[in-house]
């Protein structure tokens, strides 16, 4: 417990390391057929929504116990993170469609 407390209090917070399979596939999208890219983004969207729902359920269960207040906050972080991942995959699907429609389309 002392080591965990010392780490939490004293160790600098490292930036997150991003190893993101869907993003890497998007970066290499020119090597894929458009349908394969859409499938990867749809799978990411479904995965993110499943994880978001799991975090919501777990947070609800954790809320029942006062000792789990901080883990419940962590689950709320996860819920928000996965909601954004889901929404980002949807936006990338829109961007992919615009890319396929040609250079005159707005990708903003």
Image: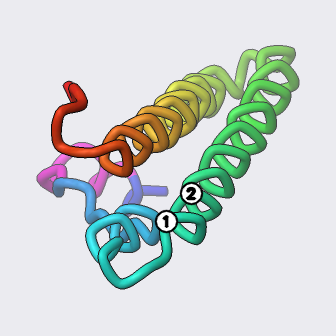
Seen in the picture, residue 43 relative to 35 is either above or below; the reply is: above
Overall secondary structure of the magenta section: helix
Quarter placement of the C terminus: top left
Question: Which residue corresponds to mark 2?
Answer: 38
Q: Is residue 64 left or right of residue 35?
A: right
Residues rendered magenta in the picture? 5-13
* Residue 10 drawn at (x, y percent): 16, 50
Of the residues tagged 2 and 1, which is closer to the observer? Answer: 1
Question: Which residue corresponds to mark 1?
Answer: 34
Gap between marks 2 and 1 measured at Cα: 6 Å
* Residue 93 drawn at (x, y percent): 48, 42
Residue displayed at 62% across by 32% down = 75
Seen in the picture, residue 99 relative to 81 is either above or below; the reply is: below
CB under 8 Å between callouts 2 and 1?
yes
Residue displayed at 71% across by 37% down = 49
Q: Is residue 95 left or right of residue 90?
A: left
Q: Looking at this view, is 48 or 89 the one in front?
A: 89
Residue displayed at 82% across by 19% down = 60
Give the image quarter of residue 29.
bottom left
Q: Looking at this view, is 2 or 16 the one in front?
A: 16
Can residue 25 be found in the magenta stretch?
no
Q: Is residue 55 left or right of residue 12?
A: right
Q: Looking at this view, is 24 or 104 the one in front?
A: 104
Q: Looking at this view, is 46 or 1 the one in front?
A: 46
Q: Secondary structure at mark 2?
A: helix
């Amino acid at each position: 417990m002392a080591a965990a407390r010392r780490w939490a209090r004293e160790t600098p917070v490292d930036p997150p390391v991003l190893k993101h399979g869907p993003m890497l596939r998007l970066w290499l999208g020119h090597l894929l057929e458009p349908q394969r890219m859409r499938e990867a983004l749809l799978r990411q969207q479904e995965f993110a929504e499943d994880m978001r729902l799991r975090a919501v359920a777990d947070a609800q269960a954790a809320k029942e116990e006062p000792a789990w207040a901080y883990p419940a906050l962590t689950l709320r972080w996860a819920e928000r993170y996965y909601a954004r991942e889901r929404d980002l995959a949807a936006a990338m699907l829109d961007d992919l469609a615009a890319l396929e429609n040609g250079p005159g389309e707005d990708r903003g």
